[in-house]
Image (cartoon, grey):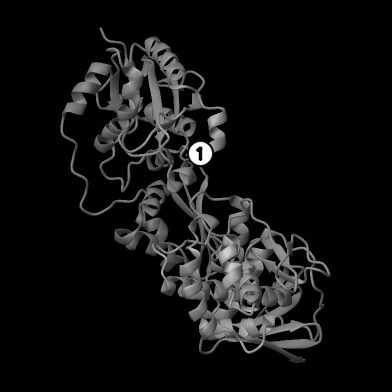
Amino acid sequence: MSAALRDLPVLVLDCQASGATPAHGDLLEIAWAVCDGAGLASDIRASWVVPASTREVPRAVRKLTGWDESCLESAVPVEEVKRDLRAAMDRVAQRAAIHYARFELGFLAPLLADGVPLDVTCVHAIARRLHPELPRRSLRALAGHLGHPASTARRAAGHVEATAFVWKAFVAALSDRGVTTWPDLAAWLESPPPRAPKKRAFPLAPEKRRSLPDAPGVYRFVRRSGDVLYVGKAASLKKRVASHFTSAARATERALEMLTQVDAVDVTRVATALEAALLETDEIKRLDPPYNVQLKRGTRSTWFASRDLRDVAAVRDAAHPLGPLPSEGAVASLAALRELAATDDGGRRLAADAPELRSRALGVPPAFVPDAKTFLAGLATFLAAARPARPSRLAWLGAARMLGAEGDDDEDADDAPDAWTPETVHAQLARALVNAAGALERARRMTLLATSQVSFVEPGRVAPRTIVLEDGDIVATTDEPPLPRAASRRPSVLDVDRYDRLRVLVTELNRLAALPGARVAVRVGGHVISWSGTHVSTHDA
């Protein structure tokens, strides 16, 4: 008689590669472990693998897997991987469970040469039959739906751990269906999978989201394990949460993967949409949800620039008064443009001799700068259109306001055009200038708000709300009117948490100031700041 599936040891495998097939990429990482119906039965063995070729590892793969050239220092030769893998397969009688077996087997083939058999079952194929109703059946979606806190990082060891968790759950579910041995499983997989429902059925019961309040607040999507997947803000919790599910037809793969895991929604009501936005950034820092991208702490830090913008420091001091800025290079484009424009030859000699200066002016990595001739042609038309009458920093900021609004509030917005021409150089220089100017304008507003009293009325409300801030921290929110005076001081250090909180506050006040019926008043010291989306000015209270 065949051994019971729950007692049968199998090898769980996962590979990470630089391409979809061996013809387009190399094996980068491999991991495996023995598991059975109770879960992992051995330690996970994981290692980087020496690539079989010198093909470049795509940028997207590097970002997803964390691979870089330093990984080669600990990478294992393929022959060593082959020897260890064969020994592991012998321990489980060549049985293996792989989530996407078709992908993995292409890269495993060279390791299984010389006629070594491998009896593989595809976990995804089992999922198609056990869970036809799920919007997505990727490994992270399945593991999260079943209660495992699967990471969004694409690393082989984490995938093996998640696959073993899914295998344990599937063995129990298969037993309930009379599939109790390895041959039973093979025969069951021969049957065609059921058709998925035409309409997506999300695990979160519709009545759970319909019961949410029609009020401002912050919501948290929670998986079965209790982990928070995502934090969002809402002017109406009921409508915003519902929109995630009702607009799922247009959702990204990442969003559908997340929604497959949502088991509950936890909410916190607040008085206004502005306060919801402020609470959201603090909750993202506190919980570090895997499916939030913006406002995460990560390894970011804030910066301050010198008056000529050529030097930056992590702390505001007499030599670096301008900030806080989101990155070390946030105003580098403006400094480079001023340097180029100050020359008698329109920057021709400087730009030709210094690719690094072209990189800073354009706000793109050095590897993606255009040749000097193309850059100079675009620079000439840009300077003719944008060069201010005076070379001062304020005059350049005025030129930026004529070119565009506040710019991209995206610290990673450094993508180069697909092809460089004088026209794309001109457009990229304009974008870089507007972004640098926007960073300085946001910094000015954030500095004003760091220690202040913010009084505002959102459309539909009668009474104002007042937020009291000290050094970037919210110390009170109240319906009481603001005091006649508020303390005034310029903080020397603003960490990422305070930076994001103040940046969100600036964005929300700009939004409010543009809405009919809304009012904004900011008190700093003995002054009241008149606030709009395009400028701020102070006058005595």
The image position of residue 391, as x and y in percent, is 67, 83
- For the image, the number of numbered tags is 1
Of all residues shown, which one is farthest toward the top? 1
Say left or right for 210 vs 201.
Answer: right
Name the spot of residue 477 as percent of width and height, x first.
69, 72
Residue at x 65%, y 73% (from the top left corner): 339
Of residue 485 and residue 156, the one placed in the foreground of this image is 156
Q: Is residue 77 left or right of residue 488?
A: left
Q: Residue 24, can we see it?
A: yes
Q: Position of residue 216 (x, y in %)?
A: 52, 70
Return the residue at label 1: 67
Quadrant hosting residue 318: bottom right
- Which image quarter holds the N terminus? top left
Q: Which type of secondary structure does the marked residue at label 1 adopt?
A: loop
Judge the density around disc 1: few (<14), some (14-19), many (≥20) Cα neighbours within 10 Å: many
Quadrant of the rendering where the C terminus is positioned: bottom right
Say above or below: 285 vs 494: above
Query: Residue sitting at 44 percent across and 41 percent down?
Result: 57
Image-based side of 295 in relation to 13, left or right: right
**Three-letter code, disc 1:** Trp
Q: Is residue 212 above or below residue 173?
A: below
Residue 35 is situated, as x and y percent measured from the top left of the image, at 42, 20
Figure quadrant of residue 193 = top left
Q: Is residue 461 visible?
A: no
Which residue occupies the foreground of this view, 216 or 415?
Answer: 415
Q: Of 425 and 64, which appears nearest the observer?
A: 425
Task: Report the front residue among 365 and 114.
Answer: 365
